[in-house]
Amino acid sequence: MENNKIDEILDKYPNDGSSLIQVLLEIQRENRWLSNEALDKVSKRLDVPLNRIQHIVTFYKAFSLIPKGRHEIHVCTGTACHVRGAPRLLDSVQDLTGLHPGETDMDLKFSLETVGCVGCCALGPVMVIDGEYHGKMAPAKSEAVLKNYV
């Protein structure tokens, strides 16, 4: 991510720690991860110690310190989705992408994560790709859905 883009994001917020999480989320949304260079720039500009920022970005699962794929796949493994077949759906997605939860492919096309609940239990099992919800997923449907993101 270019330094001027980080500066543009930082310019929108007060130069103090009150906006730290929002700044980090916006940088990550733009760049798909938080580089050491970006964290250092945020630390200096917001006058927040780098170790505090490191603590925050390692505590919240929403943040990533490694590059993520262009398309983020989240498979819900909450109770309702689990009993409706989420384990089979996850197996299918893993077979199709070659990824395990927490991994990103070498081409930075896909990242795969599991989540405890996405809040639409009646549609389980649910797969979310780039914020788009796909409900009542069966393993056979996952291939057709993933083809839309290739």
Image (cartoon, rainbow, N blue to C red):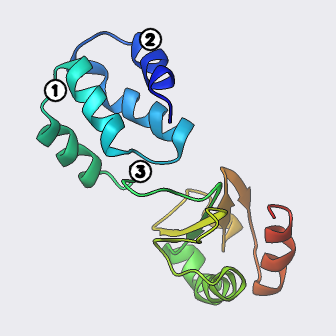
Q: Quadrant of residue 138?
A: bottom right
Disc 3 to disc 1, C-alpha distance: 20 Å
Q: Position of residue 126 (x, y in %)?
A: 66, 68
Query: How many residues crowd around disc 1 within 10 Å: few (fewer than 14), some, or many (20 or more)?
Result: some
Mark 3 or 1, closer to the camera: 1
Relative to residue 80, is residue 39 depicted above or below? above
In this rendering, the count of numbered labels is 3
**Separation (CA) of disc 2 from disc 1:** 17 Å
Residue 141 higher or lower than 87, as above or below:
above
Report the residue marked by disc 3: 62
Residue 138's disc number = none
134 left or right, relative to 94: right
The reply to whether the C-beta atoms of the residues labelled 3 and 1 are less than 8 Å apart is no
Q: Position of residue 32 (x, y in %)?
A: 52, 47
Amino acid type at image mark 1: Val
Q: Earlier in the sequence, mark 2 or mark 3?
A: 2
Residue named by callout 2: 12
- The one nearer the camera, 117 or 58, is 58
Query: Tag 1's secondary structure?
Result: loop
Distance CA(mark 2)–CA(mark 3):
21 Å
Q: Which residue is mark 1?
A: 48
Instruction: Report whether 113 appears left or right of 7.
Output: right
Taking the spot 67% from the left edge, 52% from the top edge, the residue there is: 130
Say few, some or many: other residues with alpha carbon within 10 Å of mark 3 (under 14 / 14 to 19 / 20 or more). few
- At label 3, the amino acid type is Ala
For the residue labelled by badge 2, is the local secondary structure a helix, a strand or a loop?
loop
Residue, x 68% and y 59% (percent of image)? 129
Q: Earlier in the sequence, mark 2 or mark 1?
A: 2
Tell me which residue sits at (30%, 44%) in the image: 36
